[in-house]
Image: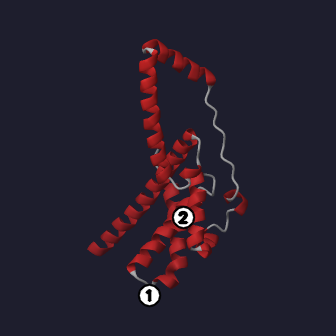
Amino acid sequence: MQPTSSMNEQFLKKWQMGLQIFRPSIDNTSVSERKRAIKLSADVAMASLRKGTTCWSRALIQKAATQDNFLVRQMLSGIKEETLINKKLPKIVCHRKIVRRSKKILMRRKSKSAMEEVAAKAKKLVKRKTQGLRNIVPGGEFMSNNVLLIQETLDYIVSLQTQVNVMRSIVDAADAGVER
């Protein structure tokens, strides 16, 4: 799933707004402070595209609010606070027939002891990989449902792709301006 051009445009507008809010304080600062300001405004812009509908966007907004509450309030002025706070995670139910059918197929294929050994290894691998995702995705540590974690991860990846595309286009435009 690729980010749309409208997502790129919306991200760019929000990111510019964040950079303009930082502009007066950024002129006489160190490189590390400028880097922090750029990253913070990009994170808030990315999260504001989702308007608090995803766990990762709420987690990024919460983290950014602890760093610079004024920036967050300015950039999220059109989003109601209730949507960002106390949002319940959706329940995702696995269909019982599918689970039973897959268990029956596995029972036919392997003996019980070999199947238990393979299942234990698979569970351990899945647990390790999902823990890795929980550490990477903002707010992932609060998601106990693996299906929701994967959906949030996919949505987060699309948003990161949007951020990268916009930043690449800015660099390309700057390079084209320098060559003239």
Label 1 to label 2: alpha-carbon separation? 24 Å
Query: At which x and y percent is residue 61?
Result: 59, 63
61 or 109, which is in the foreground? 109
Q: Residue furthest bottom?
A: 28
Task: Name the residue beneath numbered marker 2.
Answer: 45
For the C terminus, give its image quadrant: bottom left
Residue 90 vs 82, above or below: the answer is: above
Three-letter code, disc 1 = Asn
Place of residue 163 in the rendered image (x, y in percent of width and height, measured from the top left)? 45, 59
- Residue 42: % across, % down: 49, 66
What's the residue at 42%, 31% (across, down)? Answer: 121
Query: Image point 58% across, 58% down: which residue?
Result: 59
Residue 89 percent across, percent down from the top left: 66, 46
Colour approach in the figure: secondary structure
Instruction: Say the numbered circle drawn on residue 28.
Output: 1
**At 57% from the left edge and 23% from the top edge, which residue is drawn?**
99
Q: Earlier in the sequence, mark 1 or mark 2?
A: 1
Relative depth, front residue between 58 and 114? 114
Point out which mark residue 159 bears. Answer: none
Q: Is residue 180 visible?
A: no
In this view, the mark in front (1 or 2)? 1
Element marked by disc 2? helix
Mark 1 neighbour class, 10 Å CA radius: few under 14, some 14 to 19, many 20 or more:
few
48, 55: nearer the viewer: 55
Q: Is residue 174 above or below residue 94?
A: below
Query: Which quadrant holds residue 29?
Result: bottom left
Assess disc 2: are there few (<14), some (14-19) or many (≥20) residues with their C-alpha within 10 Å of its C-alpha.
many
Kindly tell me whether residue 132 is visible in this rendering. yes
| Point 59% across, 44% down: residue | 144
Callout 2, which amino acid?
Answer: Ala
Depth order, front residue of 151/161:
151
